């Protein structure tokens, strides 16, 4: 199974027509995943056969607004469907930020490739910021990066105002999973008066795809927002799994805990799981296991 992820900030109109066209194309190629559309652009992660994904991208690129899309490909285990259905949605934003006046298509930070990024990591005059959520950072990070300590990307402006002194830190380099969060954050920082802003082009996924193994500075695995949970340095499916109840990524040690029950709870949510919620999850897991015993899949259904 192959996964393709891409986004682009570009002014879009005719969203309903575009939504229908993209949904029909994806269905015809048996793709699953999520495509978000907004007036500010497109954000997509899809799974399927590699040739079908390439055909989808190729046809989408015939629209001049989507020419030369920076697609990042990665892989999943053969028994992992990655996504259960196709969703093509129109949203106010392709990445929720909630800040007025941030025109990403007009101005963003300086995108840098893997080699330049390694140089920024070594530059004492540059503040390197990880703009991902805390649970993502727990799986892996670049050494020396500042943890923004945010629970949601919408919290980034408050972090920057309170903890990122732009007078003392006029040169900022940021990274995230695929690059989209850094593009919005860099546009906001430039508007806020930061003099030099750099962003890891294509995020961690593009870095791992392009950096020579002997120059790789990434430590750990990279959280991804699908059923793979994480990918390793080769972009193959990683070792983490996800708690169905609280969505936390789980290590092998977490799953060895007596407080782990597949599909029901993990050590992080075991104590706080209310009785009715626990009973509901127990019943759901029972149905999952019965379906597996029959050779069926409990979750899934037609695309929409």
Image: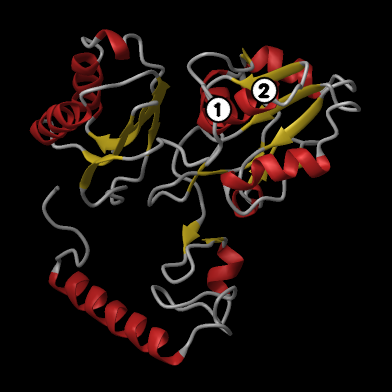
Label 1: which residue? 101
Neighbour tally class for label 1: few under 14, some 14-19, many 20 plus, Cα within 10 Å: few
Residue 2 seen? no
Q: Which mark is residue 191?
A: 2
| Residue 29 x/y as whole percent | 12, 31
| Residue at the front extreme, as displayed | 100
| Residue 137 x/y as whole percent | 65, 47
| Residue 44 x/y as whole percent | 34, 33
Task: Pick whichever of labels 1 and 2 is earlier in the sequence.
Answer: 1
Give the residue at x 41% y 78%.
264
Residue 163 placement: quadrant: top right
Q: Element type at marker 1?
A: loop
Label 1–label 2 contact, CB within 8 A: yes
Viewer-nearest residue: 140 or 90: 90
Q: Is residue 151 left or right of residue 28?
A: right
Viewer-nearest residue: 70 or 105: 105
Q: Element type at marker 2?
A: helix
């Amino acid at each position: 199974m192959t996964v393709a992820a891409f986004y682009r900030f570009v002014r879009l109109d005719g969203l309903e027509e575009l939504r229908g066209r993209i949904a029909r194309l994806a269905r015809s190629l048996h793709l699953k995943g999520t495509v978000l559309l907004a007036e500010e652009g497109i954000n997509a992660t899809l799974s399927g056969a590699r040739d079908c994904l390439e055909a989808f991208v190729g046809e989408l690129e015939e629209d001049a607004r989507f020419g030369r899309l920076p697609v990042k490909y990665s892989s999943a285990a053969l028994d992992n469907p990655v996504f259960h259905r196709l969703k093509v949605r129109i949203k106010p934003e392709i990445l929720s930020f909630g800040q007025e006046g941030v025109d990403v298509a007009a101005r963003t930070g300086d995108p840098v490739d893997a080699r330049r990024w390694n140089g920024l990591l070594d530059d004492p005059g540059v503040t390197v910021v990880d703009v991902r959520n805390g649970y993502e950072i727990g799986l892996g990070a670049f050494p020396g990066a500042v943890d923004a300590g945010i629970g949601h990307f919408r919290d980034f402006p408050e972090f920057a105002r309170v903890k990122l002194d732009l007078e003392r830190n006029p040169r900022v380099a940021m990274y995230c999973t695929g690059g989209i969060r850094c593009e919005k954050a860099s546009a906001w920082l430039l508007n806020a008066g930061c003099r030099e802003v750099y962003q890891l082009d294509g995020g961690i996924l593009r870095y791992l795809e392009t950096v020579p193994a002997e120059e790789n500075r990434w430590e750990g695995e990279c959280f991804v927002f699908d059923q793979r949970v994480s990918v390793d340095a080769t972009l193959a499916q990683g070792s983490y799994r996800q708690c169905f109840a609280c969505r936390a990524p789980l290590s092998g040690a977490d799953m060895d805990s007596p407080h782990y029950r597949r599909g029901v709870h993990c050590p992080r949510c075991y104590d706080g799981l209310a009785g009715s919620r626990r009973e509901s999850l127990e019943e759901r897991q029972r149905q999952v296991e019965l379906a597996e015993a029959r050779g069926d899949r409990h979750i899934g259904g037609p695309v929409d």
